Amino acid sequence: MRETLLIATAFDPNDTFYASCSPTLSGQKVRDTSMSAAAPAQITTPPNRAKLKAQPLAEQDFQALLSMAEGAAQQLGVKYNDTVNTSALKLARLAASARKVPAQRAATLQKIQDMAFEMRGEGASFGFDVVSHVADSLYKVIDDLPDQSNKLGLKIIEMHALALNALLAGGIRASDEDEIARQIIAALGAARKKAAA
């Protein structure tokens, strides 16, 4: 009597099959000479047992989960407010240092760019899209800086850090809701293009 293999994961030209889920043949090599080019292959898709076990959420359960998630996001936004203010102050100190201390400029600019990279992602996640816009522009200024001794570029980096501090001190979180924020972000973008030239 011949045993039938339900699923074979691979075979070689010598008709050796490697079983992956047959309980009696799992992991064993099986020589099956009855398989040839003329015999059709049968592919079986096992049922999705996890889906069968999962129960759909009732509407009230979904709403409860949604309100819990929104509450957690608001709490994180409050914590992020302190974090971003601290980061913005550190950016301003680093930007001033990059301009004033040429010996450490490369390392300082790398720190600023790393912080800007993180802040541009975090800002939008916590409802501070103004942080994302300024940090993105700051990241690009450093990326496009023709050389690290470019005085205009270094001043524009410092200008980004100071603008971010001013926007946060003014309680501005969303650039699309505030005309001053839009003007500052536009001015930073124009300055960035000037530094890259």
Image (cartoon, helix red, strand yellow):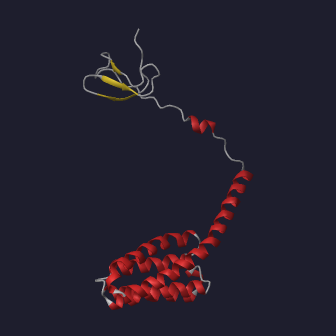
Front residue of 41 and 47:
47
Viewport quadrant of the C terminus: bottom left
Front residue of 68 and 11:
68
Residue 190, above or below 123: below
In this image, 171 relative to 58: left or right?
left
Q: Position of residue 159 (x, y in %)?
A: 45, 89
Residue at horizontal 35 percent and vertical 23 percent from the top = 40
Residue 157: tell me if it is visible.
no
Residue 54: tell me if it is visible.
yes
Q: Tell me how many marks there are.
A: 0
- Residue that extends furthest to the right in the rendered view of this protein: 60
Viewport quadrant of the N terminus: top left
Residue at horizontal 55 percent and vertical 76 percent from the top = 84
Residue at horizontal 47 percent and vertical 78 percent from the top = 135
Q: Position of residue 13 (x, y in %)?
A: 25, 26
In this image, 92 relative to 27: left or right?
right
Residue 173, above or below 24: below
Residue 124, above or below 149: above
Front residue of 96 and 3:
96
Q: Position of residue 94 (x, y in %)?
A: 44, 82
Q: Position of residue 22 (x, y in %)?
A: 45, 23
- Residue that extends furthest to the left in the rendered view of this protein: 13
In this image, 24 relative to 52: left or right?
left
Residue 183, above or below 19: below
